[in-house]
Amino acid sequence: NLSTKLDKAFKNLKGQGSITEINVATTVKEIRRALIDADVNFKVAKEVTDEIKNKSLGQDILISVSPGQMLVKITQDELTSLMGGTQENIVLEGNPAVILIAGLQGSGKTTFTGKLASRLKKEGKSVMLAACDIYRPAAIDQLKVLGEQVGVEVYAEPENKNAVEIAQKAIAEAKAQNKKVVIVDTAGRLAVDEQMMNEIAAVKDAIQPSETLFVVDSMTGQDAVNTAKTFNDRLDFDGVVLTKLDGDTRGGAAISIRKVVEKPIKFISYGEKMDALDVFYPERMAQRVLGMGDVVSLVERAQQAFDEDEAKRINQKIRKNQFNFEDFLSQLAQIKKMGNLKDLVGMLPGVGKMMKDIDIDDDAFKPIEAIILSMTKEERENPELLDGSRRRRIAKGSGTTVQDVNKLLKQFNEMRKMMKTMNKLTGSRRGMGLSN
Ligand code: GDP
Ligand code: MG
C-alpha cells in the first residue's frame, strides 16, 4: 500500500542530516508514484511533487526528526493546501433554501440526500426532499424509505415526467409548510450524456439553488476527475461530495478534483448508514492519502518548539544533580512555546515529569516565572544563597509574598531531591525524559 511505498521512499533519506538535491530527487519520484497509485491524477501528482521538491530544498532539518519525516510533513502541508486548506460549509439562503444534488447514477446522490437531510434536521432545520429522479420508478421509493428513516417529508409525483416541474412544486409546497430547506435529488446516467446534462441544467436554472452539490464516487479514481469537469463546465456547481470512502480508496481523487475544477469538497460520505457523513477536512484527507498520520504529528510537535540540544543539556545537569533555577526557567520557556501544556508538559525531562500530575493552565506558571525572574543570575544558579532577606526582596520584586517564594523554594528542593533519588535508581547512564 501507499504507506509501505512511502516508507521505502523515505528509507533513502534515513540517516542523512539534510535534504539535498540528490536524495530529494529520488524520494520525490517515489512520492509521485505513490500519489498516482492513490488515484491522484498524473499531471496533478507531478505538480505537487515539483512543489514539494522546491519547498524541501534548503529547509533546515530539525535535529529531532529525520529528513524523511520532514518530507512527509512538507508533502502533507502541500496536499492540505491543494485541497483548499480549510473546511468550507454549504450556503443556505432563501426561503426555503434550495440545495440541488447532481452526479452520475450510482454515485450516491440519493443516499447522500438522506444523510444531509438527517444532518440538517439535527441542526434544528425543517427539511423537505424533492424526488426528481423520474426515470427509475424505484428511485422515488428509495428516497421515500430514506425520508421516513430520518423523519423528513418527501415530495414526489410518480406520474409526472417533468423534473423541473416537480422541483418547483416541491419548493412551493415547502414554502407553504414553512420548511426552511429543500433538497432536490435528481436523476443520473451511467455516463455523462447530453440529455441528462440539459435536464439538470434546466432544473438548476428554474429553481436557482443557493447550493449545488456534485456527488462523486471516490472509487471511480481517474474517471471521477473527468466527470467532475464535465458537470462543472455545465453546472458551475458550488461544492463536491465525495462518497464511498468507507472502502479502501485512499481519496486521491479529492486532490485531483479540487485541483482541476477549483471547487471545494464539502462533505465525505463513508457508508450506507444515515449518520455516515462528515464535513470535509483537507488536513485529514491529506493524512489519509499519505497514510502516515503518526509520523506527521511527530514532525509537527518537534517543529512546534522542541530544542533537543537544550533538553540534552538539562538532562545532563539533572544527572549531575546540578539542576538550578536557570534550567527551570529555560524549561518553562520551552513549555510555553509548545502551546497545549497539558498534553505536552510530560515530554519535557525534569520539570515535565514533576508537573505532569499537577493541574496546569497557562496562568499557573506566571507567579513562578515572576519569582525566578526576580532572582539574580547568581541566585538562580545557587539557590542555597536564598536567605530570609533575599527572599523578601524577591517577593517584593515579583509582586508575590514571602510565603509564595518559600513555597516555590520548598517545591524546588523536593524536586531536586526526587531527581537525586531517580538518578540513584536509574544509574548514571540512563537519564530521564526525551531519550525514553
Ligand atoms: P444515486 O444513483 O446517485 O442516487 O446513488 P445511490 O444513493 O442510490 O447509491 C448507489 C449505491 O451506492 C447504493 O447501493 C448505496 O447504498 C451505495 N452507497 C451510497 N453511498 C455510499 C457510501 O458512502 N458508501 C458505501 N459503501 N455505499 C454507498
Ligand atoms: Mg438516486
Image (spheres, helix red, strand yellow):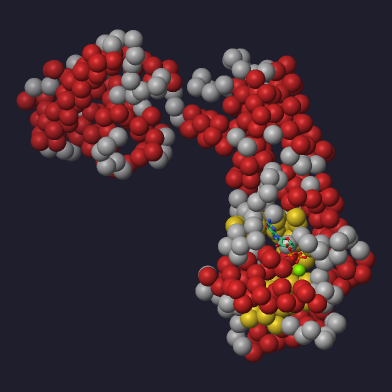
Q: Up-down: is 315 above or below 359?
A: above
Figure quadrant of residue 152: bottom right
Asked whether the viewer can see residue 275, the reply is: yes
Q: Up-down: is 431 above or below 203?
A: above
Is 259 on the left or on the right of 382, as rendered? right
Image point 78% across, 37% down: which residue? Answer: 36
Judge by depth and name the residue closer to the eye, 7 or 375: 7
Judge by depth and name the residue closer to the eye, 345 or 57: 345
Is 310 on the left or on the right of 355, as rendered? right
Toward the right, the furthest residue is 194
Figure quadrant of residue 365: top left
Image point 27% across, 37% down: which residue? Answer: 357
Is 313 on the left or on the right of 46, as rendered? left
Q: Quadrant of ligand 1?
A: bottom right
Coordinates of residue 382 in the picture (x, y in percent) = 19, 16
Looking at the rendering, in which quadrant would you find the N terminus? top right
Q: Up-down: is 111 above or below 399?
A: below
